[in-house]
Image: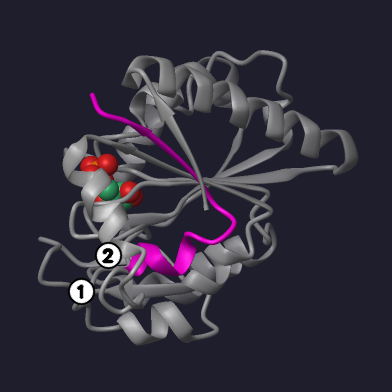
Amino acid sequence: MNLIEYPDAEMMMMDVGNTIAGELEAHLLTNDSVSFAVPGGTTPGPIFDVLCGAKHIDWARVHVMLTDERWVPETSERSNTRLLRERLLIDAAAAAIYMPLYGGTDTPEESLAALEAGILDVLPISVLLLGMGTDMHTASIFPGADKLNEALHGNAVLVPMRAPGAPEPRITLSAKVLKAAMSRHIVIIGQEKREALNRAKSLSPEEAPIAALLAESTVHWAES
Ligand SMILES: O=C1O[C@H](COP(=O)(O)O)[C@@H](O)[C@H](O)[C@H]1O
């Protein structure tokens, strides 16, 4: 794991946004299209603000997907898709091809096959951005989740997930798909998450799912 510490979050978001923009451009030089997977939650918005205006990226050749989705409609404040539509898929990045992780059915299981079929075509992920919760979950791979073993060790692309720490059902890319990404960034803010990251290094992925993704990742951290 490569850890980069920043003087403040604003500088970090700018730097991570520019680094990812450079990586997407580099992949586009040698590939017809690339895939870019991003987290939802409270952290990545400012990175999306940097990226969405990057006019030098040929967004029409970029497949954008979430690392995980909360099973709620886009009208919900908790929808990760909503965050993406408001902060990333606008301006120059409006031309990107969006690969949804929400199917509008009552349960994620009912939409699983259709969502998986869409995503399979654009794997492996070219550039992956991950977040992390203070409970050391990443994407929607939570400690104590009902399908934790399948998400960490199985061959599935997508796993429906229910967990004590998650107020609604989820759908998540599996650890296998996340680990296969060609480049991987983890972005975290604050002392509490920094301490969680340090704890995760000596825990199993079952106890701290982020531990499964630390090797070969660049972790970006700012205190505030
Ligand atoms: O629920 C989620 O949580 C994690 C971390 O979110 P944050 O608000 O603490 O940044 C996020 O990475 C994931 O995509 C999201 O669904």
Which residue is at 68% across, 61% downward?
124
Which residue is at 73% across, 36% downward?
61
Which residue is at 31% across, 70% downward?
108
- Answer above or below: position of 135 versus 126: below
Q: Which residue is mark 2?
A: 170
Asked if disc 2 is less than 8 Å from ligand 1, the answer is yes
- Answer above or below: position of 83 versus 114: above
Residue nearest the viewer, comparing 134 with 87:
134
Q: Quadrant of residue 155?
A: bottom right
The picture places residue 217, in percent across and down from the top left corner, at 54, 52
Could you say whether the residue bearing mark 2 is in a helix, strand or loop? Answer: strand
Residue nearest the viewer, comparing 102 with 160:
160
- Which residues are drawn in magenta? 209-224
Q: Which residue is mark 1?
A: 162
For the question of whether residue 185 can be seen, the reply is yes
The picture places residue 115, in percent across and down from the top left corner, at 49, 65
Residue nearest the viewer, comparing 212 with 161:
212
Q: What amino acid is labelled 1 in the image?
A: Arg
Could you say whether the residue bearing mark 1 is in a helix, strand or loop? Answer: loop
- Number of residue marks: 2
Which residue is at 64% across, 54% downward?
125
Q: Quadrant of residue 32?
A: top right
For the question of whether residue 105 can be seen, the reply is no
The picture places residue 84, in percent across and down from the top left corner, at 39, 34
Comes first in the chain, label 2 or label 1: 1
